[in-house]
Image (tube, grey):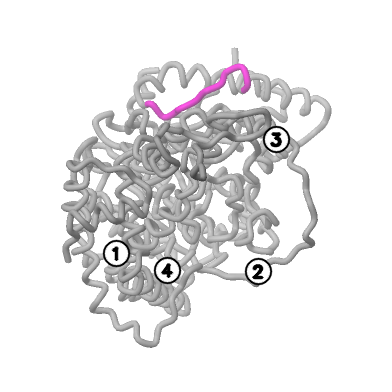
């Protein structure tokens, strides 16, 4: 089961990755090979099998919805790529009217 | 001068000497730092060493001991894999995207270690975001195997395994999603343990695949491994998958079980795979050893084993693609400017992530995308159920299961980097354990004729971590191996 160059580009867009033409081509080949290997899963009968998303599960733990202040906001802001006062600067996301 | 070598101590021995006042934590920490200076330029286990910080913690530990405090790890220098957060210090995940990230809080395991007085030496190298089996995928440099510098130390926790093997730390923490503690422990001749899923909190571990990730210890022997596990385990309200259970006294239980006889299963399917002849021979010797110790050895069947690698390499990348969506250049991490927000996302991620990480994000996004979800992600999750049921059924007949850790001895640097599938297949014996959420221990079991370390894996039922360690303790005592890499012998 192959994956085409166009599909690779579509997936890269969904994953928000910029890929050069050359890298996209390599990924198409590598991923096709890996997907071929996965094909053997088809032979397993899973008609009446429930999926496992977690190996062990507990009831979802509940707690009171209380505000816990984080003590070191400065340490979080220090990791931001660009700051203006206590706000993180990002490129403009709304178009001017 | 001391009459013993500060660089050859186990945690237990060091604690005894510290308690008797024969050594100080500062001396012990200094010895590790000197060892790092001498050996690390060759093996490159550490991404970050902070001498001043380490010695300050050691001084504090010495003061506490003088004041009569007795932490379970008071004054013991440890190495931490660089995907676990220590407040105020870098956490890079060996990725360019987190190159300048300073952790704003402590992981729960770090808080627990701090509470018991451990000393942190620094952060160790890994495959980027823990994705890999050789530590060659680090964005900064590969780590080398101290038994043969041309070979890989295994991965992804290669740095932690090498740090312990070279006595550049008395113990270490790693993380294991598909074998990332057990395989490097095996390749480097140290003990490594992946605990039962949910036994150890993952709060503050950078997420890779959340239904598989587990933090665990590396040490020189089982006693130290049991002690580290005892300290880091326990329920944590900050990790919703954390088990609400009491932590067993592992260090005590292994002594109590010193003569307990177990029923040990050998999965016949594990021999359908190509096994390196020396791995096969060593494993046969381990089976004989179990019989000699009086354990009952039985063949068991895990019929869905051959699908485990496929299942894992669908589920883990799918979860990784979701978890790594947070690296978008907005709030932290690398930002590469673009004309629009979309362009900023794409450029930041393209430049920040390395090749294998991107490959897995692509694979995972594909497996989750419309039209392929049922055929890949859902199908894999159903086969995962069958793999788990295989184990549960086997554990109705046996207490523990014994397998090799890796189908081959440590391979050469560069040997598998050009073929991702070959690299993935090297995890065949460790992956099923994560899929089922079981505890797995990697224990040194001998050497190849060229002197490379070999290892054996003990798998237990859910929360059978104490049994796994108990059998490991018996095997370790019987084997009594000398595990000193040649690189240390000239010192």
Q: Residue at x 34, y 45 (%)?
A: A17
Asked if marks 1 and 2 fall on the same chain, the answer is no
Pointer 2: residues within 10 angstroms few (<14), some, or many (20+)?
Answer: few
In the rendered image, residue A70, in percent from the top left (x then y), is placed at 73, 41
Q: Residue at x 44, y 61 (%)?
A: B434
Residue B46 shown in magenta: yes
Q: Which residue is mark 4?
A: B264
In the rendered image, residue B441, in percent from the top left (x then y), is placed at 46, 54
Q: Secondary structure at mark 2?
A: loop
Q: Quadrant of residue A51 in the image?
A: bottom left
On-image quarter of the C terminus of chain B: top left
The numbered mark at residue A60 is 2
Q: Tell me the mark number nearer the camera, choosing from 2 and 3.
A: 3
Can residue B434 be seen? yes
Q: Which residue is mark 3?
A: A73
Q: Which residues are magenta?
A: B44-53
CB within 8 Å, label 1 to label 4: no
Q: CA separation, marks 4 and 3?
A: 52 Å
Q: Is residue B190 above or below residue A53?
A: above
Q: Tell me the mark number nearer the camera, choosing from 2 and 4.
A: 2
Q: Tell me the mark number nearer the camera, choosing from 3 and 1.
A: 3
User: In front here: A73 or B9?
Assistant: A73
Chain for disc number 1: B
Asked if marks 3 and 1 fall on the same chain, the answer is no
In the rendered image, residue B196, in percent from the top left (x then y), is placed at 53, 60
Chain for disc number 2: A
Q: Which residue is mark 1?
A: B310
Q: Tell me the mark number nearer the camera, choosing from 1 and 2.
A: 2
Q: Quadrant of residue B433 in the image?
A: bottom left
Q: Secondary structure at mark 1?
A: helix
Of labels 2 and 3, earlier in sequence is: 2
């Amino acid at each position: 089961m192959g994956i085409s160059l166009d599909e690779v580009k579509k997936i890269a867009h969904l994953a928000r990755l910029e890929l050069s033409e050359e890298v996209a081509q390599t990924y198409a080949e590598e991923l096709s090979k890996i997907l071929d290997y996965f094909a053997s899963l088809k032979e397993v009968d899973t008609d009446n099998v429930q999926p496992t998303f977690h190996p062990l599960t507990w009831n979802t733990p509940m707690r009171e919805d209380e505000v816990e202040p984080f003590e070191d906001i400065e340490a979080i802001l220090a990791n931001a790529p660009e700051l203006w006062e206590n706000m993180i600067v990002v490129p403009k996301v709304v178009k001017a009217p | 001068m001391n009459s013993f070598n500060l660089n050859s101590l186990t945690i237990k021995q060091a604690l005894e000497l510290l308690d008797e006042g024969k050594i100080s934590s500062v001396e012990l920490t200094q010895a590790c730092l000197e060892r790092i200076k001498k050996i690390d330029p060759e093996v490159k286990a550490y991404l970050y060493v902070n001498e001043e910080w380490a010695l300050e913690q050691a001084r504090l530990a010495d003061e506490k001991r003088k004041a009569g405090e007795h932490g379970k790890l008071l004054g013991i220098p440890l190495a931490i894999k660089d995907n676990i957060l220590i407040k105020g210090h870098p956490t890079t995940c060996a990725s360019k995207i987190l190159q300048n990230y300073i952790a704003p809080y402590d992981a729960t395991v770090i808080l627990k270690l701090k509470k018991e007085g451990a000393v942190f030496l620094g952060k160790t190298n890994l495959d980027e975001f823990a994705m890999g089996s050789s530590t060659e995928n680090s964005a900064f440099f590969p780590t080398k195997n101290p038994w043969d510098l041309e070979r890989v130390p295994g991965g992804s926790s290669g740095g932690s395994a090498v740090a312990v093997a070279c006595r550049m730390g008395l113990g270490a923490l790693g993380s294991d999603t598909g074998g990332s503690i057990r395989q490097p422990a095996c390749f480097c001749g140290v003990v490594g343990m992946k605990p039962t899923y949910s036994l150890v909190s993952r709060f503050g571990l950078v997420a890779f695949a959340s239904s598989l990730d587990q933090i665990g210890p590396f040490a020189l022997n089982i006693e130290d491994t049991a002690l580290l596990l005892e300290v880091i385990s326990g329920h944590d309200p900050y990790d919703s998958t954390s088990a609400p259970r009491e932590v067993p006294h592992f260090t005590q239980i292994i002594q109590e079980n010193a003569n307990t006889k177990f029923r040990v299963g050998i999965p016949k399917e594990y021999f359908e795979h190509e096994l390196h002849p020396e791995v096969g021979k060593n494993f046969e010797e381990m089976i004989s050893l179990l019989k000699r110790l009086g354990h009952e050895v039985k063949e068991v069947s895990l019929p869905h084993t051959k699908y485990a690698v496929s299942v894992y390499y669908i589920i883990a990348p799918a979860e990784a693609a979701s978890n790594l969506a947070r690296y978008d250049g907005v709030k932290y991490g690398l930002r590469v400017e673009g004309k629009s927000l979309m362009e900023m996302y794409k450029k930041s991620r393209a430049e920040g992530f390395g090749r294998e990480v991107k490959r897995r994000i692509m694979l995972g996004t594909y497996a989750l995308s419309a039209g392929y979800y049922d055929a890949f992600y859902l199908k894999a999750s159903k086969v995962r159920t069958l793999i788990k049921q295989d184990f549960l059924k086997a554990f109705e007949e046996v207490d523990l299961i014994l397998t090799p850790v890796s189908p081959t001895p440590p391979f050469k640097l560069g040997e598998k980097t050009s073929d991702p599938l070959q690299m993935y297949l090297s995890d065949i014996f460790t992956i099923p354990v994560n899929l089922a959420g079981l505890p797995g221990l990697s224990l040194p079991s001998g050497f190849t004729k060229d002197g490379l370390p070999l290892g054996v894996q003990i798998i237990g039922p859910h929360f059978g971590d104490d049994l796994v360690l108990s059998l490991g303790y018996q095997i370790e005592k019987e084997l009594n191996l000398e595990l000193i890499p040649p690189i240390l012998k000239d010192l």
